[in-house]
Amino acid sequence: MAQPDSVRALFFTFNSLALRGFGGVLPWAQHVLVDERGWLERDEFVELLSLAQVLPGPNICNLALMVGDRFFGLRGALAALGGMLAAPLVIVLSLAILYSRFADLPIVVAALRGMGAVSAGLILAMALKLLPTQRSNRPGWLFVAAAFVMVGLLRWPILWVMLGVGLVSVGTARWRQAR
């Protein structure tokens, strides 16, 4: 398995991910870290992503921290996170200034609506790409279906569903490992 040449390479890889992944970095992260660079195997990526999703904070930032730490310890974790946040911080601050001036224009409202659809499509594409790694995980499928029903159909608050389903899924995983 390959690894980054330096902390600098880690920083710029995650910086390029942040700049490529407008509305959804995870599909690009999987492509770059697994397919392009070969820094992670597909199963390792799924494991790290699963952990990143249950930790507080943005999934991709958690993933960057874990990948950076794996290769260069604390320096790597900070470099990967810095790369993930540097350019987007400048862009978001610039856009916030522009938005405060032009928020009421119909074209701005329409553009934001379109970006929401793109984000949903990227999340769906990521789920479909990772689907083959979860074929044998029947309890996982049950939890996904339960969460979909509770949030999508019953309109329960996502925070409580995530907490409940998350706790039950962690408990189930521990129970399965103990057997």
Image (cartoon, helix red, strand yellow):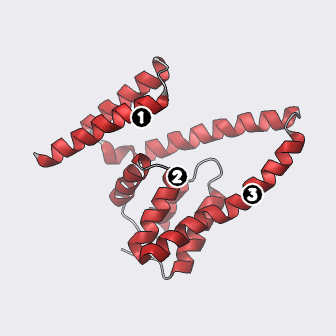
Q: Are marks 1 and 3 in contact (CB under 8 Å)?
A: no
Q: Which residue in the protein does label 2 denote?
A: 27
Give the camera-side residue of 72 and 5.
72
Q: Does residue 58 appear to the left or right of 41 in the view shown? A: right
Residue under the point 55% across and 56% down:
28
Q: Earlier in the sequence, mark 1 or mark 3?
A: 3
33 is higher (above) or lower (below) than 127: below
2 is higher (above) or lower (below) than 122: below
Residue under the point 43% across and 66% down:
67
The alpha-carbon separation of the residues under discs 1 and 3 comes to 30 Å
Which quadrant holds residue 117?
Answer: top right
Task: Tell me the kind of residue under disc 3.
Answer: Ile
Residue 26 location in percent, x, y? Answer: 52, 52
Between circles 1 and 3, the one closer to the viewer is 1
Q: Does residue 178 appear to the left or right of 29 in the view shown? A: left
Residue 42 location in percent, x, y? Answer: 37, 58
Q: Which residue in the protein does label 3 denote?
A: 91
Task: Count residues near mark 1 (Cα–Cα under 10 Å), then give few for <14, some for 14-19, many for 20+.
Answer: some
Task: Count residues near mark 3 (Cα–Cα under 10 Å), then give few for <14, some for 14-19, many for 20+.
Answer: few
